[in-house]
Image (spheres, grey):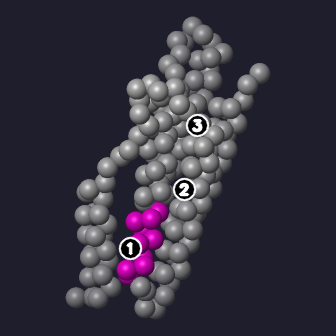
Amino acid sequence: MNLKKVFTGISLLVLFLGFQNQKAFAHCEIPCGIYADSIRIALIKEDITTIEKSMKEIEEISKSATPNYNQLVRWINNKDEHANKIQEIVSQYFLHQRIKIVEEDQKEAYAKYQLHLQLLHKMLVYSMNCKQTTDLAFVEKLRATVADFEKAYFHTH
């Protein structure tokens, strides 16, 4: 049996088993009234940078004639963990607590609501795409979408 296939199989098994015991921790949902939206955006940006670095390291290690599979698995886990963190913030913090439901008859507010939902959904999908690949195009799409959301969310007239 090809040694590379064995290591790849073992790596995938470790990845799968490693994610079986993950727990999600969200903001309180009481509601407590303690929100730090700009901090959440900063955390997302930091997670994106970490995903980008992880992708580059994965690509670099994969090119090696004798790849260090331990480090490869660690970088893959790191990339996926930070993508999960983004999904957690987008879902538990923004979608569950900060984006309020708006009735369709409130035209301007409803348009803003729809834009927020669209951008947050893109962030969730691009985070998922980052877990599925090392294509840096998804990092750039994610980064651009966060910038668009930040502009739309914090913009006031």
Q: Quadrant of the N terminus?
A: bottom left
Q: Earlier in the sequence, mark 2 or mark 3?
A: 3
Q: Kindly tell me whether residue 36 is visible in this rendering.
A: yes
Asked if the residue at tag 3 contacts the one at tag 2, i.e. Cβ–Cβ closer than 8 Å, the answer is: no
Q: Position of residue 108 (x, y in %)?
A: 66, 15
Q: Is residue 71 above or below residue 105?
A: below
Residue 17's image quarter?
Answer: bottom left
| Mark 2 and mark 3: Cα distance apart in space | 17 Å
Q: Which residue is outermost to the bottom?
A: 65
Please provide the residue range marked out in magenta. Answer: 69-79
Q: In this image, 100 relative to 8: left or right?
A: right
SS type, badge 2:
helix
Q: Earlier in the sequence, mark 1 or mark 3?
A: 3
Mark 3 neighbour density, 10 Å: few (under 14) some (14–19) many (20 or more): few
Asked if the residue at tag 2 contacts the one at tag 1, i.e. Cβ–Cβ closer than 8 Å, the answer is: no
Which residue, given by chain and number where applicable, does mark 3 sit on?
36
Q: Position of residue 99 (x, y in %)?
A: 53, 26
